[in-house]
Image (tube, grey):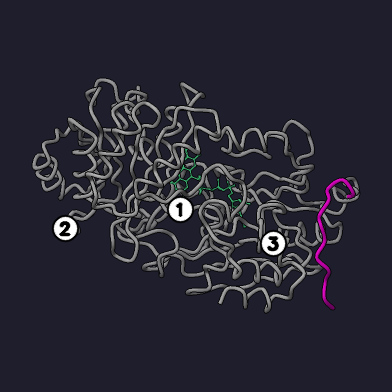
């Protein structure tokens, strides 16, 4: 029997009956705690902060096993309750904010590391990435990549909401074939069913923001771990630092897993580096295997830079310096926002990463409006660069003016100020939406996060899938 798609409405749900039906699954119904779990890092964006700060769920469920998760989904299905999955709640676009209220399912209790194979790891969705890496290290392995939030973010949240991170300059982003081997996800039906996605089909679930299935388990490729040395080098100008970063990202004989280039004005907001890294100079942050540090130093010298810091983990910890990746990726933004909330950020793809002159010209044009910060990655073998600048405004019109400057200087805007999955420079993903129709026929999962769902939800799954061709 086919199930009709509905417009989920938390105000029509009998929450007391829901609570009774959820027992014995642990729940949280204290308003202040439910509100806390209704937020993520959307506050980086003044636009999203205004739109999302009053969106709250009604109840939190905390399953610790797959059976309990199945029960949560079956109960929500019966009561027509909107459902939002939540891992660590570290997303930046309100991905785990319940737009229409409803049941928040927090996965942190489902954290087992199920299997470590010679070149893979199979884990439950709620496992923290720092724990996965710690378990892998004992086997001489590590994740191909992880976000700078690894200490508090889950693998399920990364697969559903993230894209790339520390390791991507060597191993590509999550979507690079082979990095995600398998995703298991539950449907939301009277009796939820677990579906298995392998090979290319993992892209049917990856980066769908938890709106088309509930991830239970993930199998990931792993790589040999190394004796990583945290490295920082400084340069006279941003253009030179960028050129050195691009060169290091391209050096396949140096197995770097992080290449971040940070404007000197942003680096001034890193007090933990005082006494270690000279101020007022543009910065490159890297992780390099111990046996290749000399080659790294030669590269820095050849670009006129100065190596300021090379420390292994024990030395770094003794010096009171956090993981160096906490000065890269979206942690760079956080370091500034910790002291000054009048800034925001944006995400831009550099269409020609080899064009350091173009980067320098834009850097000069931006002046004090925006301070650059580039991350180098790799996709299908080619080095890519993205810019996550600090932008000094709270005004959307000024932000859009900066977007325009980037566009006219050869960059693509991946908008960080939208709460819809298609809004960040992505087109409608009909493969995601066809899976949603099959796995979540009522449309209960993360309602409001897909602009295109309303246009296609009346179609059957095959018709939606056909739109992708
Ligand atoms: P959450 O924020 O809890 O959820 C993210 C999305 O996944 C939501 O849509 C949620 O509904 C969905 N979801 C969660 N669990 C499941 C599940 N089991 N099944 C289905 N859907 C689910 N991102 C990067 O890609 N790279 C970075 O380097 C990076 N650095 C960051 C630095 C900072 C300081 C911050 C604040 C964010 C950063 N992010 C980065 C974004 C974010 O931290 C990561 O994407 C992170 O992996 C999200 O994991 P989480 O457990 O916090 O997910």
Q: Are marks 3 and 2 in contact (CB under 8 Å)?
A: no
Task: Name the residue tied to disc 1.
Answer: 132
Task: Name the residue tied to disc 3.
Answer: 453
Is the distance from the Cβ of mark 1 to the nearest ligand 1 atom less than 8 Å?
no
Residue at (74% x, 68% y) in the render = 192
Q: The magenta stretch spans which residues?
A: 1-12
Q: Report whether 88 appears left or right of 4.
A: left
- Relative to 93, does residue 184 appear above or below in the rendering? below
Q: Report whether 80 appears left or right of 116.
A: right
Quadrant of the image for the C terminus? bottom right
Foreground label between 3 and 2: 3
Work out whether mark 2 precedes mark 1 in sequence or the reverse, and give the earlier one.
1
Mark 3, residues whose alpha carbon is within 10 Å: few (<14), some, or many (≥20)? many
Calculate the distance from the C-alpha at mark 3 to the C-alpha at mark 2: 46 Å
- Relative to 273, does residue 146 appear above or below in the rendering? below
Q: Is residue 5 magenta?
A: yes
Q: Report whether 63 appears left or right of 221.
A: right
């Amino acid at each position: 029997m086919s199930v009709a798609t509905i417009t989920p409405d938390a105000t029509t749900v009998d929450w007391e009956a829901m609570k009774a039906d959820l027992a014995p699954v642990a729940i949280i119904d204290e308003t202040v705690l439910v509100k806390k779990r209704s937020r993520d890092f959307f506050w980086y964006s003044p636009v999203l902060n205004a739109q999302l700060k009053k969106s709250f769920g009604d109840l939190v469920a905390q399953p610790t096993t797959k059976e309990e998760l199945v029960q949560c989904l079956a109960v929500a299905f019966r009561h027509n309750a909107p459902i939002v999955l939540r891992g660590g709640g570290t997303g930046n676009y309100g991905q785990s904010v319940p737009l229409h209220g409803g049941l928040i399912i927090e996965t942190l209790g489902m954290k087992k590391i199920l299997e470590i194979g010679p070149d893979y790891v199979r884990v439950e969705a709620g496992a923290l990435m720092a724990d996965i890496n710690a378990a892998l290290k004992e086997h001489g392995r590590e994740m191909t990549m992880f976000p700078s939030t690894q200490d508090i973010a889950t693998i399920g949240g990364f697969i559903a909401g993230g894209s790339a991170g520390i390791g991507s300059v060597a191993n590509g982003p999550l979507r690079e074939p082979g990095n995600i081997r398998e995703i298991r996800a539950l449907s939301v039906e009277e009796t939820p069913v677990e579906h298995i996605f392998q090979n290319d089909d993992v892209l049917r679930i990856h980066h769908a923001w938890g709106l088309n299935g509930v991830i239970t388990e993930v199998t990931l490729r792993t790589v040999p771990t190394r004796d990583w040395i945290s490295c920082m080098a400084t340069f006279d100008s941003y253009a030179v630092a960028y050129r050195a970063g691009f060169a290091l990202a391209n050096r396949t004989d140096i197995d770097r897993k992080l290449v971040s280039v940070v404007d000197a004005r942003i680096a001034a907001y890193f007090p933990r580096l005082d006494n270690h890294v000279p101020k007022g100079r543009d910065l490159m942050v890297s992780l390099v295997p111990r046996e290749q540090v000399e080659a790294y130093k030669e590269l820095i010298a050849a670009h006129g830079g100065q190596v300021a810091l090379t420390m292994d983990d024990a030395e770094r910890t003794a010096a009171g310096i956090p993981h160096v990746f906490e000065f890269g990726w979206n942690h760079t933004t956080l370091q500034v926002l910790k002291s000054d909330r009048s800034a925001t950020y944006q995400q831009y793809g550099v269409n020609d990463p080899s064009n350091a002159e173009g980067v320098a010209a834009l850097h000069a044009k931006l002046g004090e409006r925006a301070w650059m910060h580039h991350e180098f990655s790799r996709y299908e073998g080619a080095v890519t660069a993205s810019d996550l600048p600090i932008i000094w405004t709270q005004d959307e019109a000024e932000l859009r003016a900066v977007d325009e400057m980037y566009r006219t200087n050869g960059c693509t805007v991946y908008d960080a100020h939208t709460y819809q999955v298609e809004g960040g420079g992505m087109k409608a993903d009909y493969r995601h939406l066809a899976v949603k129709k099959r796995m979540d026929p009522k449309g209960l999962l993360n309602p409001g996060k897909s602009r295109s769902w309303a246009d296609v939800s009346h179609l059957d799954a095959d018709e939606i899938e056909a739109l992708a061709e």
